[in-house]
Amino acid sequence: MTEHNIFIGEYDDSPAADGTLRVAIKDNIDVAGMPTTLGSRARASAPAAQADAAVVAHLRKGPIKIVGKTNLDELANGATGINPWYGAVANPTDPTRISGGSSAGSAAAVGFGLADFALGTDTGGSLRIPAALCGVAGFKPSKGYFSTLGVHPTAERMDVVGPMAADVSRLRRAFALMAPDAEPENSAVTRVARLRFGEEENIVDETVDAALAAMGVEVEDVEIPGWREAHFVTYTIIAHQCWSNNRALLETAGDGVGEVSAAVVLDGEKITAKEYGEAFAFGNAWSMRISELLEKYDVLACPTVSTVAPEIEGLGEIQWESFSRTMQFNLSGHPALSAPLDIAGSHLKAGLQLVGAYGKDAWLLAQAEELLGRL
């Protein structure tokens, strides 16, 4: 499947034993015996990892087969799935459109049926954005729920590792392999906060609203003060920590790092200590604000991305405002998932983002499966 630019290196298409799940791993997560390239030419000759990342080592205790390492936005910096060295990852809903990122290859692998589930990372939306654009499901766990040992850091304040699958039911199965002792509490969703942003709405918003109406839950429109500021504060922290984690690579590799990824790293260099400290202070207050909202409502809901997947040709400058629905929950640390929704009269998909209380990851997945089963 090299023509789809999904895998970096070989894809193992040999049959899996009965009951064995095929797993694809984003190439910023260590797999023993395989190089971790971060999707960068600067690391194309990286030696094989000596040990599995903690999440991979845990998964090997179950019935899994690793089929390959997946392509990504270089250094996990980006949301398009367009890699300057390994090509644009094909979108399984429409190969003429971007797949989203940075966990692009992981989303495409499950969307094309090349893996039963995949691991990705999410620092500002990197699981949920490609899930939404590729018509699959992606789950960002609560911050700290899974170890990131053996995962190359982008921004430690926000980094999480989580699963992607074709739908929420299979996403739950993947999560169960990652967290076999997690049991959801016995409570149901009754009150949903439908997040609004004071902007003109479109077919994606209409699709999300129709789905929520069909679920038979009480829905109340909510605007969260500071929403836009939280997006930019998150980027401030990500850029600064990305600079700290990747500046040595930039200094030694020269043109081995692509322009887009290098720009994020260099943005981080410009951030002052005062700006960085203020961003952390805002982030702590923001986390409390979201937690307080989730004491009133069972879940928060909104489109994962407020547009369908843009076309690759003539992409130019993406309207990044469309991609500003995810970072806020990296900053707060709450679990969030993106579930695929059919758009009436279109082959493209919308993503429904559901956010739950901190630490209630298994509960959120269970409730999402139940609610989506009503559609």
Image: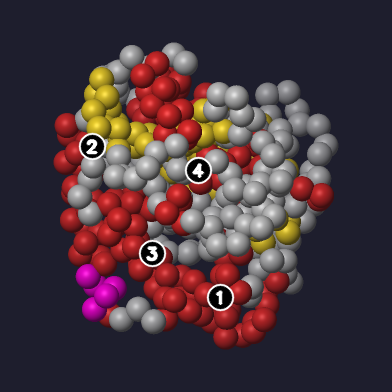
Q: Are marks 1 and 2 in contact (CB under 8 Å)?
A: no
Mark 3 or mark 4, which has the lower sequence index? 3
Establish if 38 lies above or below 182: below
Horizontal and vertical percent position of residue 98: 63, 49
Which residue sits at x=60%, y=62%?
316
Under mark 3, the amino acid is Tyr
Give the residue pinned by disc 1: 262
Horizontal and vertical percent position of residue 101: 56, 52
Give the residue pinned by disc 3: 235
* Residue 367, quarter of picture: top left
Instruction: Please tell me whether mark 3 or mark 4 is closer to you in this view.
Output: 4
Q: CA distance from mark 1 to mark 2?
A: 37 Å
Q: Is residue 292 left or right of residue 30?
A: left
User: Closer to the camera, 36 or 337?
Assistant: 337
Under mark 2, the amino acid is Val
Q: Secondary structure at mark 3?
A: helix
Q: Are marks 4 and 1 in contact (CB under 8 Å)?
A: no
Q: Which mark is residue 307?
A: 4
User: Closer to the camera, 261 or 18?
Assistant: 261
Under mark 1, the amino acid is Ala
Which residue sits at x=50%, y=51%?
126
Give the residue pinned by disc 2: 222
Instruction: Report the span colored magenta.
Output: 274-278
